[in-house]
Amino acid sequence: MTEYAIEARGLEKRYGDFALQGVDLALPQGCVLGLVGENGAGKSTLIRMILGACRPDGGTVTTLGVPAGRSAAFARAREEIGVVLDDACLPQNLTAAQLGRAMAGVFARWDEKAYRAFLNRFGVPEGQRVSQLSRGTRMKLALAVAMSHGARLLVLDEATGGLDPIVREEMLDVFNDFTREETHSVLLSSHIVTDLEKICDYVVFLHEGRVLLSEEKDALDERYALLPLDEASLSRLASERPGAILRTLRAHGQLRALALRDKLPPDAPAERAGIEDIMLLLTKGEEWQ
Amino acid sequence: MKGLLLKDLYAMRRSLPVFLLLIVVFAAPGGGGASFILFYAIVIPINLISIDERDRFDGLLMALPAHGAALVASKYILSYGYMCVTLLVAAARGALSQSLLPGAQQTYWANIGVSLALALAMEAVILPILYRFGMERGRPLCVLAILVAAALLGALSGLTSEIPPAPALVPAALAVGALLNAASMPLSARLYERRMTA
């Protein structure tokens, strides 16, 4: 069995002015990887390549140990991949019950009992057409489909976007339950960084088609710190500890600095840098001179 | 494949009775003729392709262990199913007419044969266009194809009013229609896959 649920090396894809360049990504089995980045950073393109729905211009990607693409081997691998996309993409004219019957003819290991249990757990009405369901309920239905065919890998592209906090929390609980099995893995792409902070083991930050940061989430805490200091204090610190301050950002009348924790003196007023802080400072911040 | 076929059947279940009613009304004695209603077969895949586009089903398809070819094949199969039902009703009507007016059925069957061949040819041309360009860009080209087919049919009708189509030509026309379809389905699948994976 392969060590990684997803392994991408040097992925390249060009669409007009946009280019995904040299993307490396590795999701170990049994882990949750959060893919984060602003709109147009290339997250969905990367996911399409991971699912074999889009040919890379360069590099390689294997999903569940099989090179992603249009091969018969990858079609079999898809039996074990559950996918929930941004707007669910479910057939609007079908009811949840009809969708289940159709999916039973698509997935070899479709588990109707599990599907009904998920519909019940999520409160999805079986007899209502998809078009009549709220966005939250549609996403739950998509999740029920994704989890009812013995998937070992869940790929979730903005699956929690636009949902209220209660539904989001329910979905995160489901993802957590799913990863209790050590062979189950989740790739979660989201703008909602708080969701990622709750459940991710790894974070990959994509910016303008490149991987800006790829770390274990816990390592982010150990590596980065926020310094709520004024300019003079920062200057002093920077001269004492060269290379300690990475970037600064002035926002809402406040100066914030992203620093490398291991280069700071023990008495520095270092605060925890969340994923959002790191994202903001790495993309919008200025390099400390 | 089975699942995608079922999905398409469910998706068109509300329009299915309308299609069946049209077949019965047009193919019945005194109706407009089964020849005409055979051309409606193309409406089924066009409807289903536009439903897939509206639902962004290609997004879900990349999550399924099925290729675009299966989704494409489902459209052709349902269209052929419609043609088969039409032919069955037409056969029943033909048998009834034969019992009432023996010997007057040769033109009737020749017309149906030619219409079936034209309907198959039209489908073979239109579906690859839609899978290549999508509904929005492909629709004007399809209308053009339909107009050309209608003009051909009109010209053929003009001819057949004076000279009934030689029954020997009908199997040849049907063979051409079938051959075009045999090429059209894999072509549509390839064009769809290419558009999806671009």
Image (cartoon, coloured by chain):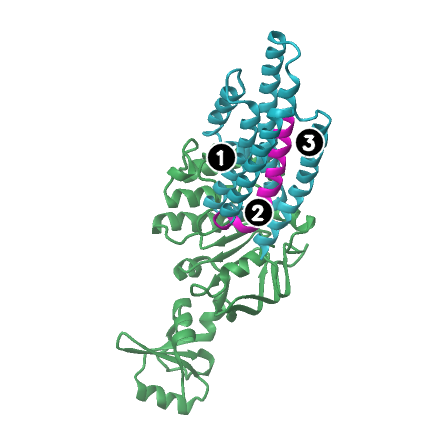
Chain colours: A green, B cyan
Whether residue A29 appears in this view of the structure is: yes
As measured in the structure, the alpha-carbon distance from the residue carrying label 2 to the one carrying label 1 is 22 Å
Give the residue displayed 39% in from the left and 67% down from the top: A276
Residue that label 3 marks: B174
Chain designation of label 2: B
User: Residue A261: x, y in percent?
Assistant: 44, 78
From the viewer's side, name the closer residue of A178 and B49. B49
Tell me where the magenta segment starts and ends, as one range: B112-137
The residue shown at (40%, 37%) is A123
Distance from disc 3 to disc 1, alpha carbons, whole Å, reads 30 Å
Amino acid at dot 2: Ile
In the rendered image of this protein, does residue A138 appear above or below residue A23?
Answer: above
Q: Name the foreground residue: A186 vs A140.
A: A140
For mark 1, give the secondary structure. Answer: helix
**Which chain contains the residue that carries disc 1?**
B
CB of mark 3 within 8 Å of CB of mark 2?
no
Q: Position of residue A12 (x, y in %)?
A: 59, 67
Q: CA distance from mark 3 to mark 2?
A: 22 Å
Q: Nearer the viewer, residue B97 or B12?
A: B97
